Image: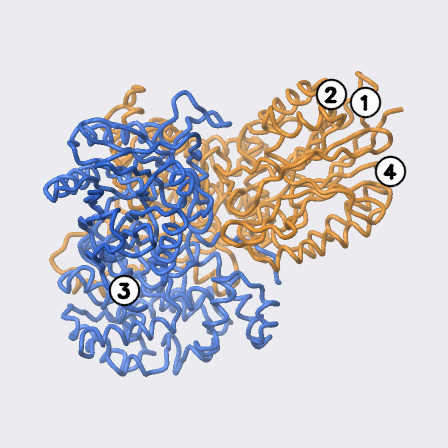
Chain colours: A blue, B orange
């Protein structure tokens, strides 16, 4: 009987933590052995974690990763392990004299490495920089055999190319393709992967085992959702999204009626986004050895949703709120901040910024003599709040979570070194309209009012001058956000957006604000990427930029 | 007579400013015509400025740049212009469905484009990301002819490959290779270029016309130093470093005794560094539409050298000093700050941070009850200074120049949102030992004491607690800097540096500090790159990083 028992090992490595990752791989391998798997596949670069970025330019690091791989190979018995690592070419050098390295997968069993596959197609777009560090693989494909079944190994991008290695390997006889991935999440990507895998399987009459990493790494979140698709393109198994663990799948190649062994449900848009933000935040905080976070609670929707996500990520006892009222704060803001803290079960303290704000005004009065009050005084207030948060961070070892959303970051509606201070920017990739949507989801999910209804319905305001409202400075978010989606996420020029029918004066002003704010965003904290183009390494625009198209 | 009159057009474009760059090209073309040049070569991507980064992912931008090129071609007469631009492949698409674009050079004369060369070798290492956006050129080489001389065109990286297009073009008959560049400066690079060009000319028995961009673009500075090398590898002309303008060279291909028409002198290490820092700072400030800068003057060497560089870049009337003493400031610091301001002829005001510092301490006292004073209070002082600088920046429209050096940034010996605030970090790529060297050069150059001798000789201190000195927290800079050079610039692991004989305890501690400070550096301002590996886009290490090698 042509049946294969396959373990999909969804692990959450820490980039660079070779000893830690080795322990995770060894643990999941033992589970796979206990579950009588014929083969267990780990994610892309599982030894180093993905993406290792320029760490792999350290030849000492590459050597150390190789030692871990060899140790792991020695642990293997009859269960075959497919392990991702960085391989070094023997005697090869780049044009600049560096050693040639590959993004590689080793096929190990019975204490030995039986073959190594080098990734052929290196993504070098969006968040990916693989051509920067790796050389592409080449040469003949190696076909392996287990339990009478022929299989091949490929890595991530390789399978996205219809005319790539997966087709070649199938032509060489592979009945199963083990494809290991470090595929970062963005909204809706899971469906794209499924469609592609189904198509690729059918085209090549080859079953596909797709294994993906789980966890947060700086601005990226990996969502797991490993899958097995049979040669007819039918989904046999899908491992959970955002969760680690071993999923075991029985693949009967002779049968066209494989049972749907384990298929995790598909999440809604906000459910999926929620999962990504929670995991990304938890991993950034914990992998950087923090336990607690502090959040400035303004009574607004942004800080409210960030607090709710932080509580889910870290536990209420690890989240600390601070209300920092000024002369311009409404009573409602304080009430709403405490209502939220109560609903979440987190502590909250109040520190008025008035004494320092007044001290700054007095101290600067001689320098500012004869000048009107302007944005300077608004920024001062925001920076007093930032200072307080950082002082609490320094004194108690809490990481500051900053609360800016993508709409604000895009147009520069924030104060650099003020409300932007912090180690992690949880919702930096959510347009304001998504902040509202996600907040409603949080309340629905909880079955009660976590984020107070008054917070959801009051007009957004920075409360930096009397009766200030966001819509005095910015167009309403339902007009702003679609323009930002086009300008920022889809690389349209202002002229093109105007041609699409958006109002010229607004488009020109917004485009200019986005360009002018580049320098401020560049000094901001990283945060979870949930869109196809975030303000992160997927968007590399010059600060000095004279284009006005 | 096989003589060619060649114009090397060293221009300082602004990235994205298509109309401005067009005007620069047209102006230099007119100069070349007036100088009776047969041919004039502009630098790489002269229409867009280099590097345009992700701007070229906007198809509207690529279309607009093409219009500018066509307009420029129409201006041409018998003098041939070689102009860099972004070309779009006709009907070609990338695997992700984007239009294929090329880093290209157009050969124009008599109102028309006669040929377009597509760069073959796309650098995708260090600060370069060209494979991210461009496709490599391919196909047969086009050989052009002027005044009976055959020439070919190549772009930057192409000429660094011994087996690259320059050799092929020579085999196809090219007697002259016009190589256009966007080659960023680092210390000592000019000599590397000269050696390479000499060798390449000799290998191919082909004269080389090397034209490079001038000017600052975010963290990069382009130093010009365009050159002409004859087929024997002899340097015939070198245009000035860091200066724009047209250099005209008469190249007699029949002669082996070409006159050294114009050879700008080679600068010393600090002279060159000084030029790079001045130009980089001037261009960042001005291209971003600022006229004035403000600098916190501590009486220390870092802020002193930054002020001296700013005065050279912008003029004394555009540079504003602020002394911000606290209870821990020595009298000498104030005296030194004012002595420097006097020597430079800049204004200086004093704003004591005491009132706000005390207000913060009082305000935070309830939250900090029962806790000892620690780094929190030191950071508070630094952040009060940052706030004052930003308030002055906001009120008067002055850009803050921040004064941290590479040694401090490396080990995290600075306060995020404190002394690190600012739009541009002038000396961020200078190790402290180079800060001393450059400061002595500034005084030598001026022939008088710009930077007070007392500043050069007193032990460095942050003055954030009584009798604080840098060497209480850090090893002496002559021990620290060589370790940093190995760890940060040369990608050695801590283990490797210890093997080289550096003390284990110091190396381990320094390496750990460098890794732990990644999150702080990431939120810092850009600054001029002068080394082969700066804290910029040439060093992409993860923040979350478990490697302890």
Cα separation, mark 1 vs mark 2, equals 8 Å
The residue tagged 2 is: B231
**N-term-proximal mark, 2 vs 4:** 4
Find residue A266 and name its label: 3
Residue at x 45% of width, y 72% of height: A481
Quadrant in the picture for the N terminus of chain B: top right
Separation of marks 1 and 4 at Cα, in angstroms = 18 Å
Residue A68's x, y, as percent? 23, 31
Q: Residues within 10 Å of mark 1 (few under 14, many from 20)?
A: some
Location of the C terminus of chain B (image quadrant): top left
Q: Are there few (<14), some (14-19), or many (20+) residues within 10 Å of tag 3?
A: some
Q: Which residue is mark 4?
A: B36
Q: Is residue B301 visible?
A: no
Q: Which chain letter matches label 1?
A: B
Labels 4 and 3 touching (C-beta < 8 A): no
Under circle 2, the secondary element is loop
């Amino acid at each position: 009987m042509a049946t294969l028992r396959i373990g999909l090992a969804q692990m959450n490595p820490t980039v660079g933590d070779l000893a830690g990752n080795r322990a995770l791989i060894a643990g999941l391998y033992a589970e796979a052995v206990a579950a009588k798997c014929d083969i267990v596949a780990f994610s892309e670069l599982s030894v180093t974690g993905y993406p290792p970025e320029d760490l792999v330019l350290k030849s000492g690091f590459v050597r150390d990763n190789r030692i871990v791989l060899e140790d792991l190979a020695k642990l293997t018995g009859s269960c075959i392990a497919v392990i991702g690592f960085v391989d070094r070419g023997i005697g090869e050098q780049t044009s600049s004299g560096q050693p040639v390295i590959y993004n590689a997968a080793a096929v190990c069993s019975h204490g030995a490495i039986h073959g190594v596959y080098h990734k052929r197609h290196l993504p070098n777009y969006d968040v990916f920089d693989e051509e920067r560090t790796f050389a592409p693989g080449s040469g003949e494909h190696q076909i392996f055999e287990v339990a009478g079944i022929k299989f091949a190994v490929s890595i991530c991008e390789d399978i996205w190319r219809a005319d790539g290695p997966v087709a070649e390997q199938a032509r060489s006889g592979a009945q199963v393709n083990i494809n290991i991935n470090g595929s970062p999440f963005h909204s809706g990507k899971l469906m794209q992967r499924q469609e592609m895998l189904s198509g690729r399987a059918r085209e090549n009459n080859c079953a596909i085992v797709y294994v993906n990493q789980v966890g947060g790494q700086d601005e990226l979140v990996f969502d797991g959702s490993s899958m097995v698709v049979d040669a007819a393109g039918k989904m046999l198994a899908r491992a959970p999204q955002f969760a680690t663990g071993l999923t075991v799948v029985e693949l009967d190649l002779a049968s066209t009626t494989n049972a749907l062994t384990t298929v995790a449900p598909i999440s809604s848009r906000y459910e999926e986004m929620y999962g990504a933000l929670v995991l990304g935040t938890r991993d950034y905080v914990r992998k950087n050895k923090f336990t607690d976070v502090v959040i400035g609670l303004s009574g607004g929707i942004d800080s409210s949703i960030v607090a709710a996500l932080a509580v889910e990520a870290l536990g209420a006892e690890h989240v600390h709120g601070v209300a920092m009222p000024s002369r311009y704060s409404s009573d409602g803001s304080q009430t709403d901040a405490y209502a939220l803290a109560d609903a979440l079960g987190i502590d909250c303290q109040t520190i008025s910024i008035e004494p320092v704000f007044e001290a700054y005004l007095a101290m600067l009065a001689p320098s500012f003599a004869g000048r009107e009050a302007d944005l300077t005084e608004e920024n001062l207030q925001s920076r007093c709040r930032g200072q307080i948060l950082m002082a609490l961070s320094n004194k108690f070892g809490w990481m500051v979570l900053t609360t800016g959303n993508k709409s604000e970051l895009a147009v520069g509606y924030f104060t650099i070194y003020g409300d932007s201070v912090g180690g992690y920017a949880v919702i930096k990739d959510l347009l304001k309209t998504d902040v509202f949507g996600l907040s409603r989801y949080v309340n629905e999910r909880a079955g009660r009012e976590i984020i107070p209804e008054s917070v959801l319905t009051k007009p957004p305001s920075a409360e930096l001058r009397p009766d200030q409202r966001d819509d005095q400075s910015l167009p309403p978010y339902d007009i702003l956000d679609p323009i930002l989606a086009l300008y920022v996420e889809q690389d349209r020029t202002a002229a093109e957006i105007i041609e699409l029918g958006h109002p010229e004066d607004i488009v020109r002003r917004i485009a200019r604000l986005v360009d002018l704010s580049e320098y401020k965003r560049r000094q901001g904290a990283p945060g979870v990427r949930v869109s196809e183009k975030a303000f992160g390494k997927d968007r590399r625009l010059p600060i000095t930029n004279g284009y006005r198209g």
